[in-house]
Structure formats: structure tokens, C-alpha cells
């Protein structure tokens, strides 16, 4: 087998580490620090834009690959990595395109303009609660990371399950314990994601503390959907649309609950563990770059309301800041494994044989010098007044595209813009004395979703002119 993979394999034309040709275990051995985004960056520098990172895997550092594997008309499918969470059935991990399409239609009902309008009211409510937490420590250092993760988790509970945070102390404690379990459990994906079979084995060992955390989070998600089904009357939340849609389908009770449990896990992870890192990086850059932050503050003064999402996202200063943050720190830095169709795939003039796993690392592609001038610098103006700094827009797809695009994109942008508007309009943001926030980036881990390092901030009140 070693002889075949190193000398006769169809991918031998792609350069890469010698051991990568033999086994993916070499990859896991380099990821005890869960920094796959940095490892792939080093491989890119050493081997070029097409790197063989496994016996049947190629990592591509070309902007065209994003559309090739996910764009409309792509025949690529999800890789075996997505089987790691079985027996759980999640819409975003199913590898059957037919089933994915059916489940996606059911999810579409929860993200219509009418549904999103209702969620925006809840975003405003929880954003104000977040601001009150900030107000309690004005002028003093605060653990911004904890505040942000708590905010996104509480908001997700309301939008997903009509769970009103703050009404039941015991339930709140259980809820936030689940948040901690989620953060610990996701850490397992950092070193093991490149080796799906090893990840699957790891998740089947419940005596390991980190696996217990993961299983605890999964059990809590299932209890959330059980509790939600028992609610007779409530405002529409995401679960209500999914429950109604599942009842309209000719499914057995076992099949219906299997998918609803999977939906609950999807809502918890996608609704909190992706938005929170983006907010952490947004606040980090607001403290690091007061000039662009002040531009947002001035633009907010022209608006009649800080709750109008369309108005907020029409501000070039706001969208530029968000886009630049997502370019540098995509929510899934290197995840999203795809398999080429039997006929193979052409990307940037190179042919990749069929049945090959393709990795398209958004973190690294978003920093390509061929696509962005001064690629490692935070320059929000590149999305408005400095379009010359963007050489190839195809390198920017923070919410993916095609059938696997993020269905919660508009909801996520609403969260980001409303929170930024509310805080920036009332506070100057800086790092505590003696700190520069560098560990936010230095300690970032790639655990399928991004895990930024600790963020401590000081919020100083400004005149309420908005």
C-alpha cells in the first residue's frame, strides 16, 4: 500500500509532505495545538497552490475552488468527514443530496422575510441586555469573550426554542453549562478533523472527558426540542417551523424525532458557535482600529433607528468592517471537505481526479496576495472606497454558496450589525492598560469553527448622539 500511494497513485503529480501520501495520521500528529489554518499556510508556502495533504486528498489555494466545489452546478459531494457525527442526523452533515434538498426546504420556511422580521425583535432585546452587561463595567476591564458567547447562546435559545433567558435560574444554569460543554466538546474537532475515522472513534469513547462534554451538549439539545414540542402556544421560532413541517411529512415518529434532534444540534452549533467568534474578532478590531470604528459611529448618526437591519447594512463603514473581519477570520477556517465527482474536477487549469477529497481553506484563500492587496492587513475600505485592494472577489465567500450556502446568513448579519451599532453608538472600545489583544489571534484555534483567544476590553461611555 505504501509503495502504491507513494509511487503509483493518481495524485502523485501533486506535491506535498511525503507522509501525507501514506496516511492522514501525519496531519493529526501536527495538530495538537489545533492550528490547522497555520499548518496549511506553511504547506502553501512550501508546495504551492495545490498540495497533496492525504493519500486521496488535495488542498487547493485558488479562489476558483470555492465555486468549483460549492457553486451552482457543482457535482461535488460532502466528504466522509460528515459521517463522524452519526448516528445524529443533521441537515448540514447529511451526504445524501436528495435528503439534504428535502430538509433544506423545511428550513427555508424558518428564514422567510416574515420570519426574520420576528427574529430581529428578539435580537434587539438581547442586544440591549448585552449592552446593560457592558454598562455595569464602564471604564473597567471586562471579559468580553464571555459576554459575547453568553449573548449569542442566550439569543440562540430564544430564536431557536423560545427559551426566555433569565426567567428560571436553575434552567439558566443548565443552559450555560451546555454552552460550556459545547465549547469543550468542539475542541475535539481541532486535532482530529483531518482524520475522520479517528474522529469517529474518538466520539465513541464516552469515558474521555471531552467526549462526555460533547455527549452532554447533544443530550441537552435533544431535551430542548422535547421541551419545545410541549409548548402549546408561543411566537414563531425556528423550531416551530421545523416541527410543523415535520408533522406535514409522512414520517414515522422515530424518523421525525431523529431529524428534529439533529435540527436542534444544528441550531445550537450554527446559531451560537459561529456568530460568537465573529463578534469577538469584530470587537477586537474595533479596539485595534479606532479610525474605522469612528467612521461607523458617525454614519450611525445619520440613521433614524439603530434597529433597522437594512439601513445598518447599507452603511459602507458597517458592511466593510464586517466583510473585512469575515475575510480574515471566516467562521470555518479550513472546514468543508468535498469529494470530486467521478469525472473529476478542473480548477485553475489543474485536473483533480474523481473521488478525491478537496479542501478549500477559506482562511488561507482569504489571505492570498493574488486576490487582495496587502492581504494580511485589516482595511475595511477595500469593500467600499478602495476597491483596488480587492483583486479577485471570488476569494471571498464567507457564507459559502450553492446548495450548501449558509441558510442563516441574513440572521447572522442582523446579529452582527445590531450589536455593533448599539455598542459603538454608546461606547469607545479599547484594550485594558498593558494589553494589546494579541492573544485573540495568537491563541486562535481551528476546531472546525474558529475559536479566538481571550478578549479583554474596556468600554468608555460616549455622548448618546444616535
Image (tube, rainbow, N blue to C red):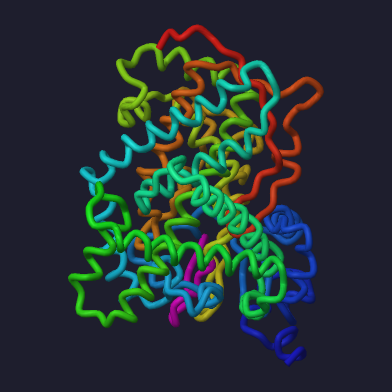
26 and 270: which one is in front? 270
Above-or-below relation of 126 to 262: above
**Residue 179 vs residue 334, the one in the foreground:** 179
Stretch in magenta: 337-348
Query: How far from the left and from the top, in percent, is residue 4?
Result: 71, 90
Residue 193 at x, y = what percent? Answer: 64, 68
Q: Quadrant of residue 258?
A: bottom left
Q: Nearer the viewer, residue 215 or 297?
A: 215
Q: Determine whether, in the image, residue 65 is placed left or right of residue 283.
A: left
**Quarter of the image with the C terminus in it:** top left
Is 130 inside the magenta-drawn segment?
no
Q: Residue at x 25, y 69 (%)?
A: 246
Q: Is residue 251 left or right of residue 90?
A: left
Judge left or right: residue 89 versus residue 99.
Answer: right
In the figure, 433 relative to 96: above or below? above
Looking at the rendered structure, the number of numbered marks drawn on it comes to 0
Split into 4 quadrants, where in the image is the N terminus? Answer: bottom right
Residue at (46%, 30%) from the top-left corner?
Answer: 129
Q: Is residue 370 visible?
A: no
Residue at 76% of width from left, 89% of height from top?
A: 2
Residue 342 location (% of width, % of height): 44, 82
The answer to whether residue 352 of the structure is visible from this angle is yes
**Residue at the spot 30% in from the left edge and 30% down from the top edge:** 310
342 part of magenta stretch: yes
Q: Front-most of 69 and 207?
A: 207
Residue at the left extreme? 248
Amino acid at each position: 500500500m505504501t509503495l502504491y500511494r507513494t509511487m503509483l497513485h493518481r495524485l502523485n503529480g501533486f506535491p506535498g509532505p511525503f507522509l501525507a501520501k501514506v496516511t492522514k495520521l501525519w496531519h493529526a500528529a501536527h495538530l495538537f495545538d489545533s492550528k490547522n489554518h497555520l499548518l496549511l499556510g506553511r504547506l502553501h508556502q512550501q508546495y504551492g497552490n495545490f498540495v497533496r495533504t492525504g493519500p486521496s486528498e488535495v488542498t487547493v489555494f485558488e479562489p476558483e475552488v470555492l465555486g468549483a466545489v460549492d457553486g451552482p452546478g457543482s457535482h461535488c459531494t460532502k466528504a466522509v468527514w460528515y459521517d463522524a457525527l452519526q448516528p445524529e442526523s443533521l441537515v448540514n452533515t447529511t451526504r445524501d443530496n436528495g435528503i439534504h434538498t428535502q430538509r433544506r426546504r423545511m428550513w427555508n420556511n424558518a428564514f422567510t422575510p416574515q420570519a426574520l422580521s420576528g427574529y430581529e425583535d428578539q435580537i434587539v432585546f438581547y442586544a440591549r441586555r448585552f449592552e446593560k452587561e457592558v454598562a455595569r463595567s464602564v471604564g473597567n476591564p471586562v471579559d468580553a469573550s464571555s459576554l459575547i458567547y453568553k449573548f449569542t447562546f442566550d439569543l440562540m435559545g430564544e430564536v431557536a426554542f423560545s427559551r426566555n433567558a433569565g426567567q428560571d435560574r436553575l434552567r439558566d444554569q443548565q443552559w450555560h453549562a451546555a454552552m460550556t460543554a459545547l465549547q469543550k466538546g468542539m475542541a475535539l474537532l481541532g486535532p482530529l478533523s483531518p482524520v475522520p475515522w479517528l474522529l469517529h472513534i474518538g466520539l465513541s469513547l464516552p469515558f474521555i472527558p471531552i467526549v462526555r462534554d460533547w455527549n452532554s451538549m447533544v443530550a441537552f439539545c435533544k431535551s430542548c426540542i422535547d421541551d419545545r414540542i410541549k409548548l402549546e402556544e408561543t411566537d414563531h421560532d425556528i423550531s416551530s417551523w421545523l416541527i410543523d413541517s415535520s408533522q406535514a411529512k409522512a414520517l414515522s415518529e422515530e424518523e421525525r424525532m431523529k431529524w428534529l434532534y439533529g435540527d436542534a444540534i444544528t441550531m445550537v452549533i450554527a446559531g451560537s458557535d459561529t456568530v460568537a467568534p465573529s463578534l469577538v474578532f469584530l470587537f477586537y478590531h474595533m479596539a485595534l482600529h479606532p479610525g474605522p470604528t469612528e467612521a461607523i459611529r458617525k454614519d450611525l448618526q445619520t440613521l433614524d433607528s439603530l434597529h433597522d437591519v437594512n439601513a445598518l447594512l447599507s452603511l459602507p463603514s458597517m458592511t466593510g468592517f464586517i466583510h473585512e473581519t469575515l475575510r480574515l477570520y471566516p467562521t470555518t477556517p479550513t472546514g468543508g471537505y468535498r469529494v470530486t465527482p467521478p469525472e473529476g474536477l478542473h480548477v485553475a487549469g489543474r485536473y483533480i481526479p474523481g473521488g478525491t477529497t478537496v479542501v478549500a481553506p477559506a482562511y488561507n484563500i482569504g489571505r492570498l496576495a493574488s486576490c487582495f492587496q496587502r492581504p494580511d492587513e485589516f482595511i475595511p475600505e477595500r469593500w467600499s472606497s478602495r476597491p483596488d485592494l480587492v483583486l479577485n472577489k471570488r476569494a471571498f465567500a464567507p457564507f459559502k454558496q450553492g446548495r450548501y450556502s449558509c441558510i442563516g446568513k441574513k440572521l447572522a448579519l442582523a446579529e452582527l450589525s445590531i450589536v455593533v451599532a448599539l455598542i459603538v453608538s454608546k461606547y469607545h472600545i479599547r484594550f485594558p492598560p498593558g494589553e494589546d489583544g494579541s492573544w485573540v489571534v495568537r491563541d486562535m484555534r481551528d476546531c472546525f469553527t474558529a475559536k479566538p483567544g481571550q478578549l479583554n476590553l474596556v468600554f468608555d461611555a460616549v455622548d448618546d448622539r444616535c
